[in-house]
Amino acid sequence: MKINSAEFKISNSDYRKCPESNLPEYAFIGRSNVGKSSLINMLTGRKALAKTSATPGKTMLINHFLINGEWYIVDLPGYGFAKRSKEDREKLWRMIQGYVMGREQMTNLFVLVDSRIKPQKIDLEFMEWLGEHGVPFSIVFTKMDKLGKVAGPAAVEDYKKVLRKTWEELPPIFMTSSEDARGRDELLSYIDDINKQLKSNQ
């Protein structure tokens, strides 16, 4: 898939105020500082579409980006905001939960995981929550360029072993790097295939 246009549409804190459209939405989420904004910029080929920051947890709103006039990338707030107050954490979780559970247009949720870090309880519990609620999701390993050619895939395999303890079938898995655009074609092809399937079912 070629991305010809990518434009920011709206930011808000309530899924009920998201764009009124029937276009499919592909949402991206992960723990703070997992490289979400960088990945979105890499996928779209726009260096500053999603704002990147050295400060974890900068995304505090639901951000919609219209791609090729046909589908949306949705940048969700990160979870696991350790430095935030309990009130802020609960507010952000309600925002995430509202979108994930209430937004009919959400077609797939990409859960981002830092490939350099061993499986974290918060990520595993979040994926279990998605599975329990029947939310379609995929796992995207980020920052693969930081690991060697052998160490990177080995880390992903180790992660899969942990997942298999609780999952009979694993969700789709992608290995990416915002630095060298690794995984870009695979992710965009996956989205393109779903979009084509949705059109053929209309």
Image: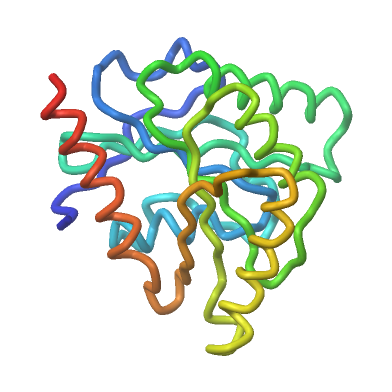
Q: Residue at x 69, y 56 (%)?
A: 55
Residue 79 locus on image (x, y percent):
70, 40
Q: Is residue 159 shown above or below 36?
A: below
Residue 144 locus on image (x, y percent):
54, 75
From the viewer's side, name the closer residue of 60 and 72.
Answer: 72
Q: Residue at x 29, y 46 (%)?
A: 191
Q: Is residue 109 shown above or below 86?
A: below
Residue 135 locus on image (x, y percent):
52, 28
Residue lying furthest top = 16
Q: How is the image coloured?
A: rainbow
Quarter of the rendering containing residue 128: top right
Q: Residue at x 65, y 39 (%)?
A: 127
Q: Is residue 20 left or right of residue 119?
A: left
Q: Is residue 98 left or right of residue 55?
A: left
Q: Residue at x 26, y 42 (%)?
A: 7
Q: Is residue 48 shown above or below 64?
A: below
Count how many numbered circles sit on residues in the image: 0
Quarter of the rendering occupied by the C terminus: top left
Residue 24 locus on image (x, y percent):
29, 29
Residue lying furthest front = 168
Quarter of the rendering occupied by the N terminus: bottom left
From the viewer's side, name the closer residue of 52 and 150.
Answer: 150
Quarter of the rendering containing residue 33: bottom right
From the viewer's side, name the closer residue of 159 and 144.
Answer: 159
Q: Is residue 59 left or right of residue 2?
A: right
